[in-house]
Amino acid sequence: MKRLFFHVITSCFFFVITAAQQCIDPDATASCSNSSNNQTFFAWDVAQAPPFLSGLFPNNTLLQSAWETHPLLSKVSFAHHHQQQSQSDQSIPSILHDRSAILKLQSEKEEGDPLLSLLTVDDTISIISRPFMRHGVDYKLAKKIVQNGEEHLGILPKSHYSIDEIRAHFRYGGFSVVIDRMQRRWAAIARQASRLEEELKSIKVGVNMYLTPEVVLESEKDKRNGHTRQGFEPHWDWMDVIIIQIAGRKRWSVANEPTIYLSNRDQKRKPTIEEIKHYVQSPARFSEFTLCPGDALYVPRGHIHNASTVLVDGDASNEPLNKCPASYPSAEIQQLLNWKGQSSLHLTFGFEQSCEGTLESLLHHALNLYFNDNRSFNSIALPAETCSSRNQAAKSHDIKWRAVLHHALATVARKRHPCDFPSFHGSDAKQKDCNGNASLRRSLPLGLSGKSESVQYSNLKHAFLQALDIFVSSASIVATAEFVQSLQKPPADPELFFCFPEYTVEDVVACSDALMLLREHEFNEVLMDFHEKASSNFHEALKVMDKFGNGMREMNRKQQLDDLKRVAQVNV
């Protein structure tokens, strides 16, 4: 009788939560669209813009409104040096500026331009020439190839190439040079990565370098293939990125809506043929634009994008977004514009929150606190014999509720959502607030646990409580079992693995079939109890998340410093 009464109370609780969810669900009515859960949780406000970000994007309001929402272009234009946002639906939202903001950051201790002197082609050759640099691991010679009508990334097979071989593949083969983890290889880049990491309170900022060859039309076939050279096929990233054009020029195309809204690392994959076809249609992407020396581009994770070098005579339209300034005040920058014919050099700064720095991560920490504080709770969801009887190869251990709920939360955060590829699925992205389960993928800055009086802290607490409602009302045994079963297949790219923050939970992957034996009402009882206790435990969960995130950051910085010392780049 007592269990029946508890089951009735649980059912009523879930009815209330589901009703409240109507003002979070993006398919709800317009009257629910003003949820504060749509905010991004910056560690700074509009009035206190961090200097380096403000130098890159000299309009703090536009940057904040774009973050995790839509791409934003920051373009040098001395003829239009007032800040403005483009009005056309097909033009990428843009800031036009005269570089005065970034030049204010020029340090007396450091020579050269704060951005454009970060790296030269000679620096690139110096890095690749180091004896321990392995092709395919530390750098790649890559280009887009087409097979059977489908685009792929082609990478040369050997583990080592001489500088002469690299130059030949670059000049005559059309291969781009890509160097990963530049923050561990070059001190000037490490300094700027650390500045961005600190300003955005991010766990880690990684930097990749892309050197793409000029267009060479040596045959009729080249002419038919177009006046471009590409290092990568259209793709999306699992991290928010800021691209800085260092030298030459590059033509870009960026989707105006995400394929996977705020994609997690383990959600990244090769776009399907249908998704690529949708992307190449003009309504699904912004008009093409050209990056010139000093320009910057922000692309949220999950947005397909594509870039290529072009012939100068290809820059014929969409003034001023498709033009480089006719002349720069600095002769040094003018030289970079026409650098190495029409080769292009740019840096991509990626903000790697992964499984450690999102709203989902905060809920995982809350779950861990809940189970640590409830040691008298019957923690076994399924005894060991249940698993082993259904799968002889499975490990013989009990399946704990801790593991079940962690995987249930991960399932909810990865559930397909109307903001994933919205127009492809027939919904209007501009009418959606992209709340609901997809909001669990939003990134959080470190350090808010020490700012409990701030607006950002208050906004995050409100979002945390809404996220609790979303999790509890959306979790199901069937969906969790299906997700756990999907983890049995290893990712095509081993770097795109699924993870939990701070800790590991026992392996339930081999027992995914056994999860279907869980009783729904018992599952809901545990969820309800967690909801009640976690609602008053926000600050403790945030403190744990900050501690863990700062520990990850310090570990990354130590590895970075060790690597820089190894290559005699210790001036960080």
Image (spheres, grey):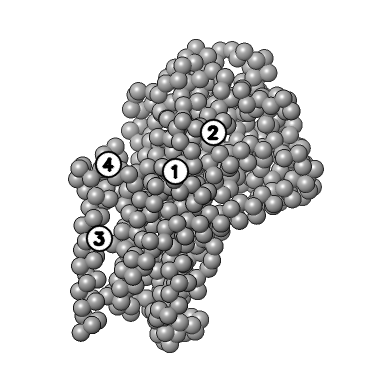
Q: Amino acid at mark 3?
A: Ile
Query: Which residue does the numbered mark 4 point to in the structure image?
Result: 34
Discs 4, 2 touching: Cβ within 8 Å: no
Q: Quadrant of residue 473?
A: bottom left
Q: Amino acid at mark 1?
A: Ser
Which sits earlier in the primary sequence, circle 4 or circle 2? 4
Closer to us: mark 1 or mark 2? 1
Estimate the spatial distance between the alpha carbons at disc 4 and disc 2, rounded to whole Å.
28 Å
Above or below residue 249? Residue 536 is: below
Which sits earlier in the primary sequence, circle 4 or circle 3? 3
Determine the secondary structure under disc 4: loop
The x and y percentages for residue 404 are 40, 71
Quarter of the image for the C terminus: give it: top right
Query: Which residue does the numbered mark 1 point to in the structure image?
Result: 454
The x and y percentages for residue 419 are 33, 46
Query: Which residue does the numbered mark 3 point to in the structure image?
Result: 17
Please indicate whether residue 516 sits to the left or right of residue 182 in the image: left
Query: Which residue does the numbered mark 2 point to in the structure image?
Result: 50
**Label 3 Cα neighbours within 10 Å, binned few <14 / some 14-19 / many ≥20:** some
Determine the secondary structure under disc 3: helix
Residue at x 45%, y 20% (from the top left corner): 83
Residue at x 33%, y 78% (from the top left corner): 518
Please indicate whether residue 423 sits to the left or right of residue 383 in the image: left
Q: Which mark is residue 110?
A: none
Which sits earlier in the primary sequence, circle 4 or circle 1? 4
Q: Nearer the viewer, residue 569 or 421?
A: 569
Determine the secondary structure under disc 1: loop
Quarter of the image for the N terminus: give it: bottom left
Which sits earlier in the primary sequence, circle 1 or circle 2? 2
Estimate the spatial distance between the alpha carbons at disc 2 and disc 3, rounded to whole Å.
39 Å
Above or below residue 228? Residue 374 is: below
Discs 1, 2 touching: Cβ within 8 Å: no
